[in-house]
Image (cartoon, grey):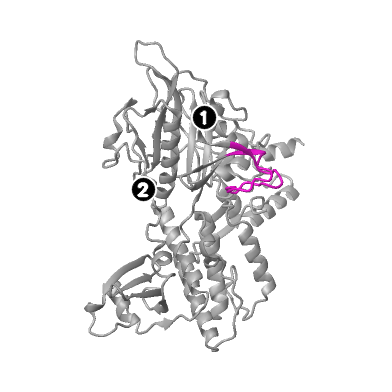
């Protein structure tokens, strides 16, 4: 026993990055080390240099050989999966006491985040300078893709023709042309892997009726393809509509963190179980608490059948959009797990999170380690009333922080950033949350992954349209229609994470349909794909996808250094 204890102490303590965590505690990682910050009252964090004493995970050759072999086998089996979920703890934090009011948010020492209102010597300043051009009265919700519904509105109800082609430099192209005889003009949509171009051209510009190639070159000079293939697939309108609107979703999910007084670490915040009356009042401002068992609305990846993600949750509807809040205190608590992976697997896979502070402890922008979380909106309850007067009730102070590559978004904070009415606070927060997520998609990381997803979906769309068109004229044998990512009309649009799963299925389907050999992982050998596919397997996959359409499950997204493809692993509980 003593020998085994010494072995366990050799493992360094690590914490989760929550890239689709399993939700369990890794018993092979030692959690004996603890890091308890000094209790403080009216204190602020001063992030200073401190020595890093990090023990390497090494097994000595003199220990039990059988135990050594076991660990080596486990390490080989899990490999990168374990490393991607956990990272080394940061150095211990040093605290100093200061007097005066404390800001809601502190910038990290390493930088990389902007704060609104701006942080400057612990003094709150006027926010309009940080977001120019956004009026306080502007509570408009941003559109993620303002032209996504052009095809539905201007093409589907009219006679039109679609074409496909593969350009040597631009890749897959899908062109739609609609003749508006009354206006004597042509309406054109050209879909490329990087963007979609939409234009309206007068017929008087052409001496003769233009060809598809001429129309494509009118919108994009880089088109070099010599001819397009006409689409004669009966399902083309549904498939094209689904692709155009794959980024359009009326469902959102946001994390909600509860930060008590003196809590300055991720472990402390995620370990909160009891909800104070003040925090419960704040949750009632956001939405309604409902039982998850049998819940039929947008579930945001939570389990509504077996109770594996808690018994209740906070949901609301706002401006025609359904919102699910992943409240940390309502998610399962795992005794003995300082990292609380069962909670972080949901909140860490959200893009925007709310933080409710109970006490003066500030929130540090990078306190939660996550590849997805890009923005935090922090709320603190403050006394209402002017200086020298008796406080008459309470108000809510708000501050926002986001990664530096996230563009500013409205509505702008008032000056001072304090709300005295719960109704106005609710409208502001819900609008700000939705706009924050849409703005985060423009960040470098999400923009790069979205471009890859769009390219895969477009490749699958062109392949499906081309194959189905050849089948209509009898050139090939009809394949099984299993393009889950671009079928189902308006229901095909989904969350950001769901589109990555869809893109991988599309890419796999396009390889099988075209008969292109795929490289299998590991050996590098080429395996010839199956030419035909039984309808049973495809139907089961389609049925499973339609069941989980709105789930937004936690996924692990890794960029393979060899192939550059996305590897997706969904959490088992969320897909049930």
Picture layout, residue 177 above or below residue 115: below
Q: Is residue 122 left or right of residue 461?
A: left
Above-or-below relation of 477 to 438: below
Q: CA distance from mark 1 to mark 2?
A: 30 Å
Residue 460 colored in magenta in the image: no
Please provide percent x and percent y for residue 338. Answer: 61, 35
Q: Which residues are magenta?
A: 289-314
Q: Which mark, by number, is residue 405?
A: 2
Q: Which mark is residue 493?
A: none
- Please state if 551 lies on the left or on the right of 133 as rendered: right
Q: Is residue 48 visible?
A: no
Q: Is residue 266 left or right of residue 113?
A: right
Snapshot quadrant of residue 533: bottom right
Q: Nearer the viewer, mark 1 or mark 2?
A: 1
Q: Is residue 70 visible?
A: yes
- On screen, residue 106 versus residue 354, left or right, reads left
In this rendered view, identify the residue nearer to me: 178 or 225: 178
Residue 319 is situated, as x and y percent measured from the top left of the image, at: 46, 45
| Residue 522 sits above or below residue 372 on the image | below
Residue at point 49%, 30% (across, down):
356
Q: Residues within 10 Å of mark 2 (few under 14, many from 20)?
A: some
As helix, strand or loop, the secondary structure at mark 1 comes to helix
Would you say residue 302 sits in the magenta stretch?
A: yes
Of the residues under marks 1 and 2, which one precedes in the sequence?
1
Q: Main secondary structure of the magenta part?
A: loop
Residue 31, x across and y down, in percent: 64, 36
- Disc number at residue 282? 1
Q: Residues within 10 Å of mark 1 (few under 14, many from 20)?
A: some
């Amino acid at each position: 026993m003593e020998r085994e204890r010494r072995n366990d102490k050799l493992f360094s303590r690590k914490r989760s990055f929550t890239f689709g965590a399993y939700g369990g505690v890794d018993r092979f990682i030692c959690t004996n080390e603890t890091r308890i910050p000094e209790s403080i009252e009216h204190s602020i964090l001063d992030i200073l240099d401190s020595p890093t004493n990090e023990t390497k995970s090494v097994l000595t050759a003199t220990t039990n050989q059988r135990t050594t072999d076991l660990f080596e086998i486990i390490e080989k089996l899990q490999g990168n999966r374990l490393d991607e979920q956990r990272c080394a703890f940061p150095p211990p934090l040093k605290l100093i006491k200061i007097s005066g009011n404390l800001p809601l948010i502190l910038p990290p020492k390493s930088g990389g985040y902007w704060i609104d209102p701006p942080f400057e010597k612990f003094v709150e300043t006027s926010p309009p300078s940080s977001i120019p051009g956004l009026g306080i009265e502007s509570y408009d919700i941003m559109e993620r893709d303002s032209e996504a519904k052009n095809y539905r509105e201007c093409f589907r109800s009219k006679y039109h023709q679609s074409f496909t082609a593969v350009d040597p430099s631009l890749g897959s192209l899908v062109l739609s042309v609609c003749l508006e005889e009354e206006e004597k003009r042509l309406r054109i949509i050209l879909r490329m892997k990087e963007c979609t171009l939409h234009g309206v051209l007068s017929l008087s510009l052409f001496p003769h009726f233009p060809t598809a190639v001429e129309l494509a070159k009118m919108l994009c000079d880089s088109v070099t393809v010599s001819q397009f293939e006409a689409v004669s697939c009966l399902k083309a309108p549904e498939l094209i509509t689904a692709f155009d609107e794959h980024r359009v979703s009326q469902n959102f999910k946001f994390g909600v963190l509860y930060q008590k007084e003196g809590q300055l670490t991720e472990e402390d915040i995620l370990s909160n179980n009891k909800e104070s009356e003040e925090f419960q009042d704040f949750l009632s401002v956001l939405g309604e608490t409902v039982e998850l068992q049998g819940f039929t609305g947008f579930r945001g990846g939570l389990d509504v059948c077996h109770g594996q993600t808690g018994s209740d949750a906070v949901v609301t509807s706002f401006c025609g959009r359904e919102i699910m809040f992943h409240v940390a205190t309502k998610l399962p608590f795992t005794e003995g797990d300082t990292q609380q992976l069962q909670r972080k697997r949901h909140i860490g896979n959200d893009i925007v999170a709310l933080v409710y502070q109970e006490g003066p402890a500030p929130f540090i922008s990078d306190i939660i380690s996550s590849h997805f979380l890009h923005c935090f909106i922090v709320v603190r309850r403050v006394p209402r009333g002017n200086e020298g007067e008796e406080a008459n009730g309470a108000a809510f102070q708000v501050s926002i922080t986001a990664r530096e590559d996230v563009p500013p978004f409205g509505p702008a904070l008032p000056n001072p950033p304090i709300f005295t009415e719960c109704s106005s606070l609710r409208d502001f927060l819900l609008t700000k949350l939705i706009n924050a997520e849409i703005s985060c998609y423009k960040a470098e990381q999400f923009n790069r992954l979205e471009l890859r997803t769009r390219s895969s979906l477009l490749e699958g769309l062109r392949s499906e349209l081309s194959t189905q068109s050849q089948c209509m004229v009898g050139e090939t044998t009809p394949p099984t229609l299993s393009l889950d990512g671009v079928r189902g009309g308006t229901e095909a649009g989904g969350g950001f994470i769901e589109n990555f799963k869809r893109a991988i299925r599309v890419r796999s389907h396009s390889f099988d349909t075209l008969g292109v050999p795929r490289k299998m992982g590991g050996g590098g050998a080429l395996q010839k794909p199956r030419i035909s596919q039984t309808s049973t397997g495809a139907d089961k996959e389609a049925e499973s996808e339609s069941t989980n359409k709105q789930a937004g499950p936690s996924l692990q997204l890794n960029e393979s250094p060899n192939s550059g493809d996305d590897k997706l692993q969904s959490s088992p509980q969320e897909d049930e």
